[in-house]
Amino acid sequence: MELIEAIRARHSVRSYLDKSIEPKKAEALQRAVDEFNEQSGLSIQLCLDDPAAFSNLLAHYGNFRNVTNYIALVGPKGSEFEEKCGYYGQKLVLLAQTLGLNTCWVGMSYSKKKNVIVVKENQKLHLVISLGYGKDQGRASGSKPMSALCKNESADPLPEWFTAAMEAALLAPTAINHQKFLMTLQQNNQVKAQALRGSYSIVDLGIVKCNFEIGAEAAGAVLGRDWFWA
């Protein structure tokens, strides 16, 4: 499965089968975690066979069922690292989808005390991603129209690659599906990405930027050659 296909296929799943993640898939995820930590300065952690984190009332009220595996997005405090959590977390979400696994971004519905996560001094547990074999594949969420989430400040009509990138961005999971972001095409194929006011909007921006890059590349536009982040 290509990453653009994973973007289209992936939906949030909160209820999971009692089925372990196979060693080869766990190893692939761990390799990616190690690589992304080195690139980002985060301390992302793959947590397997830990039912305690989702055994509290918050998880129950959040409709999470049988969650025993998750990815903990840990790193320094600050908006820079919140965006990195979204960006690299989404890369892991899409990798999981290509491996036949299901996921859900989780901001609050888990125990921050009863878990195996290691949070060092000057670090913060930003959020987690549930992981495993879903009882179903979830369902698509509604989306705002593309025109409400992007602007064109260039002298030319929107190029096909930008439209394709926006189509991928529209499928990005965001907090409460509020889609608090704005993408602006500026002169010289510069793209400005903005987080608007809202809960977890900076994390969401990282998720959106990940999807946007994949959508643009699938349309043949290479970041750093055909277009650039402003």
Image (tube, rainbow, N blue to C red):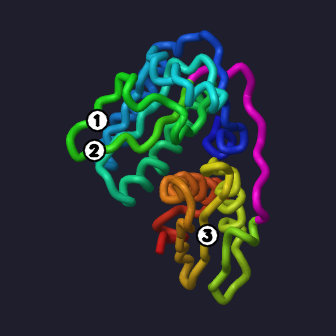
Secondary-structure class at tag 1? loop
Mark 3 is on which residue type?
Answer: Leu
Per the image, the residue denoted by label 2 is 123
Sequence-wise, which precedes: disc 3 or disc 2? 2
Secondary-structure class at tag 2? strand
Mark 2 is on which residue type?
Answer: Gln
What label sits on residue 119 in the rendered view?
A: 1
Sequence-wise, which precedes: disc 1 or disc 3? 1
Q: CA distance from mark 3 to mark 2?
A: 29 Å
Callout 2–callout 1 Cβ contact below 8 Å: yes
* Helix, strand or loop for the magenta stretch, by majority: loop
Please tell me whether mark 3 or mark 2 is closer to you in this view.
2
Q: Nearer the viewer, residue 177 or 2?
A: 177
Per the image, the residue denoted by label 3 is 182
- Screen quadrant of the N terminus: top right
What is the x, y in percent for residue 87?
A: 48, 50
Q: Nearer the viewer, residue 200 or 141?
A: 200
Q: CA distance from mark 1 to mark 3?
A: 32 Å
Q: Which residues are magenta?
A: 132-145
- Res 99 quadrant in image: top right
Q: Is residue 107 magenta?
A: no
Residue 163 lies, with reference to residue 100, above or below; the image says: below
What label sits on residue 41 in the rendered view?
A: none
